[in-house]
Every structure is written in C-alpha cells, then in structure tokens.
Image (spheres, rainbow, N blue to C red):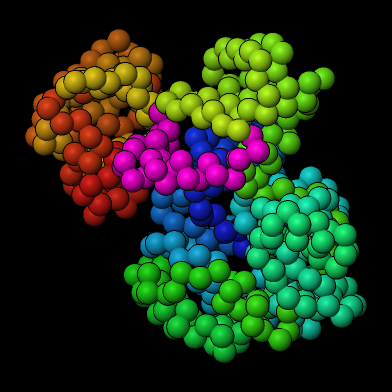
C-alpha cells in the first residue's frame, strides 16, 4: 500500500502574533535556527518516503509561499523535492474537509488502498528516528483498517493540549478510550500521574478508503460537498484548485467529525519530542536559557536585573531593566509586551485588532508576493514609500490605480516597464512616473533581483485601490487585493 504524506498548510497561529500574521503565518516564520516549520516538515517526510507522492493541502494565498519554500529547502539541503502535488482550498474549512479532499485525491492519483500520513505544517519534531518508528507502527495499524492518531507522551501537566486516553493494547498501539478537551491544571496533573493519557498531536495515519467510509457514516454532508468540489476542480498538472462547493462543507475538525465517533480508532504512543509552538512559551523553549532563566533571540540585547523573560527582537537593540516573567516580541511594525504566563491569551489581542481592522493582523511591514516582496518604509498624509524586490524572471500584474500615482526609482537590476502604451527598460539609477488611471506593469527580465523604491502619492493609498487586467498568477479576477 502506497504511503502518501499529506501536509496541511493553513491557519494563522494568532497566539504567535506579531511574528505570525494571516498573510505570513506560523509555518513560514523562521525559527531561531533560521529554518521554518514547514521546511522541517518537508524534510521529515522526505526522510521517511523520498519517492512517495507528496500532497500539500493549502490555499491560493499560501500556494506560492509553499512552492517557494520547498524550492528553497531543496536548494539549501540538496534534497530532491519531486512528485509534489497541491490541493488549493477556495476557503479554509478545518481539518475534516481538507482530509476528505486528500483522501479523494489519493484514491484517484495514488491508488484506492493508499495510506494517508497527515501532518500539520507547524509542528516541531527533532528525533527523526523515533518519528519514523512511530509512522511505521501507525502504518501497520492503518493497513488493518484503523483510523490512527499519534499521541505524544506528556512531559508535564500541559493545559494547552487536548488529551487521548489509552484503551486496550493492540499490536503496535492502543485502542482509543476517549478524547478529552484541554483540561485545567488539576485535571492535567491527574492525567499525567495516571500514565493513561497522551497529548493529542493532531497527526494521523489511515487508509484513504477507511477515512471515506467513516465520513460517509459520520459526516456525509462534508463528504458530499468535497466530492462536488473535486469534480468541479480546475486541474493544472500537479495543482488542483477545488471548486466553490468546498465552501459548503461544515467547518469541523476531524476529531469532532470522525475520531470521537468511529469504532475503529487507534493511537500510537509517540516517544519523540514534539512541540506545536502554539504559544510564545513553546517558541521560547527553542532558545537557550542564561543564568537568570532568560531566553533571548536578539543580536543586541542588554538585560539588567531581569529574570525568566522571553525576548524576540532580531532587528534592533533591546534593553530590559528590572523585569521578571515578561514576554517581549519586537517586529518592525508591532511590539508585544506581556506576562509570559498569559501567552495563551495573545489571541485576544489579535481579536481586538481584527475589530479595529488593523493591518498588522494580516500583513508584516515586509509583504511576500508570488513575484517577490515589498516593504513599507514610511507613510504619512498623501504619501507612502516602499522598497520593492522582484525575483528574476517574475512580473507583477498589468494593473491600474484610481487614486494614486507612483514614482519608481531602480536601485539595482533592470526593470521592464509597461506604462500605458509605452514599454521600456529602466536601468539602475533611472526612474519613471506612473500617473493615476494609467495601466502599468513591472517585470524583471534579468538574472538578479530587481530592487526599486516606489513613492506613492494621492488622496487614497490603501492596498485595495487596484484593478488587475492580466496576471500570470491567476489573480486578475480579484479586484480588491494587493499587487
């Protein structure tokens, strides 16, 4: 039976704000070692089954990020990343619809008896050997028709995770007695002391046909919607863009929809280290502690009479005096200061920012796009200054703005610019002017990154002032998105 790794790449990781944003979420954020979680997930599955088809379930916004991240991983580590496929969701609907789509895809592409190894893209596991052993055990149970989840051996009375109670022993795991929601401190201590409970990791292994059978019984409305979305999917080689019927599927997790109901559910006790980096305490654990218990990721940090603080400040000098148990996260456009013991509550700040429609919920100062990046350097009344980097061979959409004009100054590289009816090359130290209402396009025809400074001026400078006429990334139909 073919083993098909499935990477689920979605979710914003709001408890890791301001490092994690909607447009650049937790899986893509660089850890203190410089590697992202999705890169680590990719390398983990390649080490298990290098020749297997790899499926990533994501959406159009994250597709280009994921594709570029996989390519970068291959470049850095020299690992072959081949036979990669993508399922693009039109909207996020939780793990059950995502896994249903993966199962239907696997039956068609990899065979009716293929086994799915479903892995979130934002988990951290260091012990590859123990992980591979757990996958082998799970695969044995999946071949027998079990819906298998991975339960991590607890290392403390953690209240941020759900728990799984072990039932009767099986050849390479246990039947699941029950799933338990995130407990309070007292219950978590009881679970730890009993030795009968495992952390619910959110990783799964099961035959595609076993999952589809369970969905038909326990979540038929999910299966019906996803089947329709598969039928109407736009298929372009290794990428299937699911139809709009996908949005009709109930927004429900696989635990609630299937795992808590099905009779054939098993758990493999995983003895590898595991961290879902669900909050800043988890991120802080990746940093070494100094003699005062401080965990610091900052090139220039001064701490005086301060203990047990977590500091993430890679951009500038940070000085701390007389603080204990404080969390400090400094990014170019947002600063978080909190009691580190309340890091699970950071998402409440994000909810308040959402209510204010604050841009820091979605975007960093540097925004990643399929063609490169742009960084907002400064803005004020009627002006905004950006640094734009266009990757070699890439180009922005043919577009127009109603309310702003733009000045482009090339800093390095060569730009091919369409400006109304005119097309020309603009070299380093040269510039051009794009008036409001004029269709224009920016392209990098060279072999190195194109870097330019853009100065916007006008009465309205928001990113939704854009009309796309043509776009190689399929975004021309989106009338109110950024370049």
Q: Give the image location of residue 436, x and y in percent.
A: 10, 30
Considering only vertical position in the picture, is 474 above or below 137?
above
Residue furthest to the front: 186
Q: Give the image location of residue 43, x and y in percent.
A: 70, 48
In the image, 349 versus 362, the foreground residue is: 349
Can residue 343 be seen here? The reply is: yes
Q: Is residue 19 left or right of residue 185?
A: left
Q: Residue at x 19, y 39 (%)?
A: 465
Is 349 a magenta residue?
yes
Is 23 a magenta residue?
no
Q: Is most of the magenta stretch helix, strand or loop?
A: helix
Q: Quadrant of the C terminus?
A: top left
Residue furthest to the bottom: 217
In the image, 452 versus 62, the foreground residue is: 62
Q: Residue at x 81, y 50 (%)?
A: 156
In the image, 414 versus 117, the foreground residue is: 117
Considering only vertical position in the picture, is 286 above or below 306?
below
Q: Residue at x 77, y 76 (%)?
A: 176
What stretch of residues is rendered in magenta? 340-369
Considering only vertical position in the picture, is 177 above or below 247?
below
Residue 116's image quarter?
bottom right
Q: Quadrant of the N terminus?
A: bottom right
Residue 221's image quarter?
bottom left
Q: Give the image location of residue 363, x and y in percent.
A: 40, 37
Q: Residue at x 89, y 78 (%)?
A: 169
In the image, 34 versus 422, the foreground residue is: 34
Can residue 68 be seen here? The reply is: no
Q: Is residue 203 left or right of residue 271?
A: left
Q: How many marks?
A: 0
Q: Give the image location of residue 326, x and y in percent.
A: 63, 28
């Amino acid at each position: 039976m073919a083993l098909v790794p499935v990477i689920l790449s979605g979710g914003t990781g709001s408890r890791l704000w301001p490092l994690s944003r909607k447009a650049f979420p937790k899986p893509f954020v660089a850890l203190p070692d410089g590697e992202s979680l999705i890169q680590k997930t990719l390398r983990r599955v390649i080490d298990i089954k290098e020749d297997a088809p790899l499926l990533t379930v994501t959406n159009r916004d994250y597709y280009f990020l994921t594709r570029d991240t996989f390519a970068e991983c291959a470049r850095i580590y020299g690992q072959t990343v081949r036979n990669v496929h993508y399922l693009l969701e039109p909207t996020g609907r939780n793990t059950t619809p995502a896994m249903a789509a993966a199962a239907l895809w696997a039956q068609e592409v990899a065979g009716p008896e293929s086994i799915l190894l479903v892995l979130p893209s934002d988990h951290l596991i260091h012990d590859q050997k123990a992980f591979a052993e757990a996958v082998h055990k799970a695969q044995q149970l999946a071949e027998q028709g079990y819906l298998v989840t991975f339960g991590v051996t607890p290392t403390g009375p953690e209240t941020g995770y759900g728990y799984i109670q072990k039932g009767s022993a099986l050849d390479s795991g246990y039947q699941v007695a029950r799933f338990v929601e995130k407990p309070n401190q007292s219950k978590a201590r009881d679970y730890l002391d009993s030795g009968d409970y495992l952390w619910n990791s959110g990783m799964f292994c099961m035959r595609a046909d076993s999952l589809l059978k369970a969905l038909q019984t326990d979540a038929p409305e999910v299966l019906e919607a996803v089947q329709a979305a598969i039928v109407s999917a736009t298929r372009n080689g290794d990428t299937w863009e699911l139809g709009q019927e996908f949005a009709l599927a109930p927004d429900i997790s696989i635990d609630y929809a299937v795992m808590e109901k099905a009779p054939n559910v098993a758990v493999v006790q995983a003895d590898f280290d595991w961290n879902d980096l669900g909050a800043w305490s988890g991120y802080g654990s990746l940093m070494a502690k100094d003699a005062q218990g401080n965990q610091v990721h900052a090139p220039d940090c001064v701490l005086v009479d301060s203990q047990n603080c977590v500091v993430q400040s890679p951009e500038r000098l940070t000085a701390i005096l007389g603080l204990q148990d404080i969390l400090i996260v400094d990014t170019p456009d947002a600063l978080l200061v909190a009691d580190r013991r309340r890091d699970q509550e950071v998402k409440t700040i994000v909810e308040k920012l959402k209510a204010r429609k604050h841009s820091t919920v979605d975007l960093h100062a540097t925004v990643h796009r399929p063609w490169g990046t742009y960084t907002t350097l400064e803005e004020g009344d009627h002006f905004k200054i950006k640094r734009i980097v266009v990757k070699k061979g890439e180009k922005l959409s043919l577009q127009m703005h109603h309310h702003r004009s733009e000045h482009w100054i090339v800093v390095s590289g060569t730009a091919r610019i369409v400006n109304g009816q005119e097309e020309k090359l603009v070299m380093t130290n040269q510039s051009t002017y794009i008036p409001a209402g004029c269709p224009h396009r920016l392209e990098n025809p060279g072999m190195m990154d194109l870097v330019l400074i853009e100065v916007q001026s006008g009465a309205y400078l928001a990113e939704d002032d854009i009309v796309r006429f043509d776009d190689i990334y399929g975004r021309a139909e989106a009338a109110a998105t950024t370049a």
